[in-house]
Amino acid sequence: MAWCQWLYSSRTQYLGFTVGAATVLLATLLPVSEIATPPGSDKLHHVLGFAFWASLCAWGSSLRYFVFASIIIALGGAIELIQPFVHRHGEWNDFWADTAGVALASLLHLVIRYVKKRGTNTA
């Protein structure tokens, strides 16, 4: 049961936020020539990247999660504003794809909370 307590701890959420931030910031702010571009749609990459980032924060407190999710969305907008200064092309459709990814992770968070609550009620 100790691993379960660790999984739902605030440290896990902070660690997830930090790892996700580092990953997404490197992928979105390095010049395109310096990173490998995976196959597929750019918008799909945004949805999946931000869903991944937000889902790393989904395992703890709901209040903390939704604060992190709001920060992630705000950072998605900031990234789009910064990209022209690092030889990238910022566009608001990318921001909306980022927001959709966070929304998907928010659904995951709600499912995790529901399953956790049901598990504690039956014990």
Image (cartoon, rainbow, N blue to C red):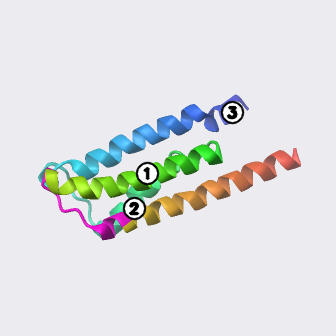
**Looking at the image, which residue sits at the far right?**
122
Number of labels in the image equals 3
Q: Secondary structure at mark 1?
A: helix
Mark 1 in CB contact with mark 3 (< 8 angstroms): no
Which amino acid is tagged 3? Gln
**In the image: residue 26, left or right of residue 48:** left
Quarter-wise, where is residue 61 in the image? top right
- Find the magenta span and give its range: 86-95
In the foreground, 60 or 52: 60
Tell me the quadrant of the picture where the N terminus can be found. top right
Can the viewer see residue 40?
no
In the foreground, 82 or 36: 82
**In the image: residue 117, left or right of residue 72:** right
What residue would you read off at disc 3?
A: 5
Which amino acid is tagged 2? Asp
- On whether residue 32 falls in the magenta region, the answer is no
**In the image: residue 111, left or right of residue 45:** right
Distance from label 2 to label 1 (Cα)? 9 Å
What residue would you read off at disc 2?
A: 98
Q: Position of residue 20 (x, y in %)?
A: 41, 44
x 12%, y 53%: residue = 33
What residue would you read off at disc 1?
A: 72
x 38%, y 68%: residue = 96
Q: Position of residue 40 (x, y in %)?
A: 29, 68
Mark 2 in CB contact with mark 1 (< 8 angstroms): yes
